Image: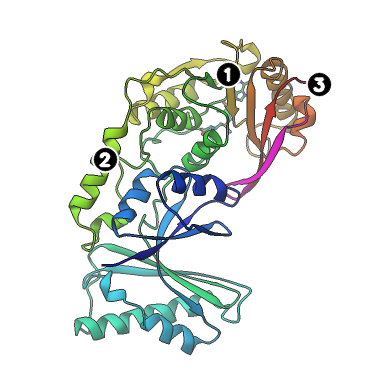
Amino acid sequence: MGKIKLAVVCSFGLEAVVKRELIKMGYENLFVDNGWIYFEADVADIAKTNINLRSAERVLLVMGSFQSETFEELYDQTYSLPWEDWIEKDGRFTVNGKSYKSKLFSVPDCQSIVKKAIVDKLKQKYQQEWFNEKGAEFTVQVSIHKDRAVLTLDTTGAREGLFKRGYRKDSVLAPIKETMAAALVELSFWNKDRVLVDPMCGSGTIPIEAAMIGTCTAPGLYRHFASEDWQIISESVWQDTRDYYESLVDEEVNLQIYASDISEQAIKAARSNAKRAGMDKYITFKVLDVKDYVLPEKHGVMITNPPYGDRLGDQDIVIELAKTIGNTFGSDPTWSNYVITSYEAFEKAYGQKASKKRKLFNGDVKVNYYQFFGEKK
Ligand SMILES: C[S@@+](CC[C@H](N)C(=O)[O-])C[C@H]1O[C@@H](n2cnc3c(N)ncnc32)[C@H](O)[C@@H]1O
């Protein structure tokens, strides 16, 4: 098989972070479009990107893109694509869809047309009238935006996006997605030689992702991806890719990562999640109210995700916590402090205007990522 086209999908606002990860992995000529990053690749890159990307949500194989204003066009263009190169005789396939600002606005109709075109194509290629659909999972997505359709196959897995690393079995209320936690660390000035603190760590996602970054542990090393069951990518490709990323893990690195929370149950969950991720030996856990925090040393980095107020506790508590964080971590100008929250008046309560403020989405919730450096005025 020759070159293929991949599209890595990420949460809005994280395109630059994911692009940086892809560049670091050696990809070039990346085209960014609204949460999608397109690039040319080889089949083996499906394994490489799924296993190693930290902040992206999923990796899609782009089957084709075309102008489509009528159902006939959608059917014909879909039929013309080489589905049989990928979808096996017994492939289990579903079609998802979305349409935005387009003449073909009925998503269920678009899904049925696409499904019919693919089934007709497979019938013709396999000379078979009926498919038992008991084999590997192939999730097709038809996305139509301003009359341009993009047809993709989900290489990651429809139900289990890249955020599902597999370690977070114990959770507290309102955990942050693993992919977002990794992005927060990547957007910070933290490196493995600096102290990292999350004083409201909940189930431990931010410290665990930081430890994985610090130890160079690829986040997808120990999980399964839908495309691992596809015959077109041989088992040895997956094995070689895993072997390669395993060889990069630095188990001897000395990390100073501190995770605390007022809730004993949260610390218990965080500890067992970290153990499952193989990261427990890099993180010091403690049950602690943030108001009792004493900074361990100079030049540390604090990254946290306090209660949002709309989901946990009330707004007075949110304001009080922001003040506490500001007074504790903002009091030392050598620290770099980062807070993700949906509370709009956070800077006022923290007591400092953020040096940088980035708009992100935590799931469907609009949030800001505040970055505070230097002296508090
Ligand atoms: C939104 S959750 C953090 C979720 C976490 N990032 C995760 O991925 O699971 C907020 C956390 O703040 C903790 N918290 C609330 N008040 C606190 C306080 N005064 N001191 C320390 N932790 C506190 C809660 O117990 C909760 O676990």
Quadrant where the N terminus is found in the figure? bottom left
Task: From the image, tell me which residue sits under label 1.
Answer: 300
Task: From the image, tell me which residue sits under label 2.
Answer: 244
Q: Quadrant of residue 134?
A: bottom left
Task: Label the magenta part by its dominant secondary structure.
Answer: strand
> Residue 291, image x and y in percent?
66, 15
Tell me the tag on residue 377. Answer: 3
The three-letter code of the residue at mark 3 reads Lys
Q: In the image, 189: left or right of 92? A: right
Question: What secondary structure is marked by label 2?
Answer: helix
Q: Which of marks 2 and 1 is in front?
A: 2
The three-letter code of the residue at mark 1 reads Gly
> Crowdedness of circle 3 by 10 Å Cα count: few (<14), some, many (20+)?
few
Front residue of this view, candidates 313 and 139: 139
The three-letter code of the residue at mark 2 reads Tyr
Boundaries of the magenta span: 353-365
- Tag count: 3
